[in-house]
Structures are given as C-alpha cells and as structure tokens.
Image (cartoon, rainbow, N blue to C red):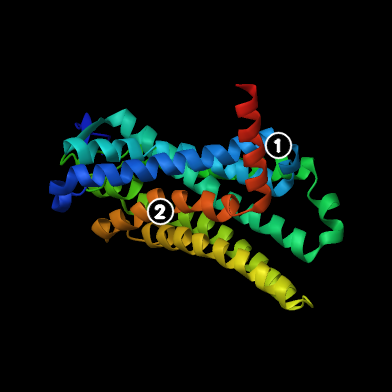
Amino acid sequence: MGNVTTVQEFTLEGFPAIQHLGKVLFMVHLLAYLASTAGNTVIVTITCADSRLHTPMYFFLSIFSFLECCFINAVIPKLLIIFLLGRQTISFPACFIQAFVFVFLGATGSLLIAVMSLDRYVAICKPLHYTTIMNLKTCFLLVTACFALAFPLISGLVVKVSQLSFCGPHVIPHFFCDLAPLIHLSCSDTSSTEMLAFVVALVILLTSLIITIIAYSNIVVTILRLPSARERQKAFSTCSSHLMVLSLMYGSCVFIYVKPKQTNRLDSNKEAALVNTVVTPLLNPIIYTLRNKLVHQALRETMCKMKISR
C-alpha cells in the first residue's frame, strides 16, 4: 500500500486527568523551565568568558549545557501551552520537526555523557597523560563524533516514521511529538519501524551506558586506592552526584525507548519523559558545575566585572 496519510495536524493530549490543575502545573513547570534555561546558559557563558575554565572538562560541559537548552526549548514551551490552554494542535511537518530535534539532541547528549565519562576517567586514572590525550583536537573530534553518529541514525528513523500512513485518529497521547506515540497512531504495518526504533535506541543508549559504566568502574577503583580518606570522600561525593543524574537520565530513556514493542506503556512513558525533560535538565547545572568552587569563583568575578562596568 502507498502512503494514504489524511491527517494534516495532530493534537497533543497532555495530561487530561490533571488538566484541572493546569494553572498550578503551568507555574511549576514555568519556574523549572526558567531555572533550567538560566542555569545551563550561565554554564555556557561562564565557560566561554573565564580562561580558567578553558579545559576539556568544562568544554564538554558547556556543549552539554547548550544541548540541554535546545533540548528543553524543543518541548517545554508546548507543554506550558497545554497546561495553560488545554489541548494543543500541531501541524504534521512541525510535529516531525519537533520529534527529530528532541530525539537527535537526546541521542547526541547521551553520547556526549559517555565522552564526559571518558574525560573523567583519563583525568583521574591517567593524570600524567591527561593533557597529552585530551588535547583540543581530540576534544573537537569526540564532540563531532557524537553529532556525526547520532544524525544519520535519527534522521533515517524519523524519515521512516514520517513515511507511515496516518489516517486517524489524530490525538497523540503525549505532551510532545515523540516517535513511539506517532508509530502507535499509524494505520500502516509498523513492525519494521518499531524494530528499527528499538535497534537505534539500543545502539545509542547501550553503547553510551556501557562506556559510562566501564569509565566510572575504573574511576571507583582508582579512588579506593587513594591514600587519604578525605580525598576518597571528596571524590566519591562528586561521583555520586554525577551518577544520580546519569541514573535518572538512562533509567527514563531505557524505559521509554529500549523495548521492541513501542506501543506499550504509552501512558507511563509520559511520566518518564517528564523526568527526562524537566527534572534532569534542572539538576544538571547544580550537580555538574554550580557546586564547583572554581565555577563559583568565576561567576562571582564575572558579576563583579559587570557591576564595575556599569
């Protein structure tokens, strides 16, 4: 059968069970959105402005924060409109653009976290060779590799989903255009598309997760060998914070995407997606850098310079 799509626009269902609390939820998510955007923007700005932060770790963090800003801006504004006004329509092309941006940025961010884990592994486990291994060229190549690997995989998947037939219903049981609910709405045979989505998610998420686990396992072993108890406590404190964010992100992503049958558990996917789009972007600035003394110092000095310039 050829493509017999008759749907010109979709309607994002949102959270109908709690829509009566729309204004309260709007305010809560608006504050979280503003805090996430501000926190990640501060990280990018401070990293660019302060020469002391021109290191591989902060370079990767600034790229990650930039991705987080784009990631939440692809989804949260629509969610705010849903809470404020109820159901929200979105055109067919806009829906697939949103799906591509969301999944592409999410996949790139997942791979970038693996790169950040490798950076910490080299810094802690091979400190004498750190500056040689993690030079500027290597950092750019690693970031480019994250984008280059994610782009063709996600582009191919989104194009395949967009070529499915959509002949009604047009209500997406989600608060943004994600691939699983779109596949669910199709009136085509979606078995091959579901399998492709499963394989792509498996490749990206599990590759990133395995690299991260191996890196942090070696980091933990190295930390346990430190002679000073104070040094071990400080290192474990930092690692535990990072691992908390990683657990939230990987847990929600694996729950949503790594399953052969994409049409299962769509309702619970919405709650897991909220963790991925609201909670982790809010925690990342706090855990990764805003707790860091060097960032605090750079932030204070930048604010002092701004006051003097006035």
Residue assigned mark 1: 50
Q: Nearer the viewer, residue 187 or 136?
A: 136
Q: Amino acid at mark 2?
A: Val
Are there few (<14), some (14-19), or many (20+) residues within 10 Å of tag 1? some
Residue assigned mark 2: 279
Q: Amino acid at mark 1?
A: Asp
Q: Nearer the viewer, residue 252 or 178?
A: 252
Sequence order check, earlier mark of 1 and 2: 1
Q: Is residue 182 left or right of residue 147?
A: left
Identify the element where label 1 is drawn.
Answer: loop
Identify the element where label 2 is drawn.
Answer: helix
Tell me which residue sits at (53%, 49%) in the image: 285
Are there few (<14), some (14-19), or many (20+) residues within 10 Å of tag 2? some
Tell me which residue sits at (61%, 56%) in the image: 114
Q: Nearer the viewer, mark 1 or mark 2?
A: 1
Q: Is residue 277 left or right of residue 110?
A: left
Task: Examine the image and state in which quarter residue 220 appears.
Answer: bottom right
Distance, label 1 to label 2, CA atoms, is 28 Å
**Residue 255 pos. (x, y %):** 38, 62
Task: Examine the image and state in which quarter residue 211 appears.
Answer: bottom right
**Residue 59 pos. (x, y %):** 68, 43
Residue 166, visible in the rendered structure = no
* Above-or-below relation of 291 to 251: above
**Residue 67 pos. (x, y %):** 52, 40
Task: Examine the image and state in which quarter residue 251 appears.
Answer: bottom left
Tag 1 near tag 2, CB within 8 Å: no
Residue 62, visible in the rendered structure = yes
* Above-or-below relation of 298 to 235: above
* Above-or-below relation of 25 to 218: above
Q: Please count the marks in the image.
A: 2
* Above-or-below relation of 225 to 176: below
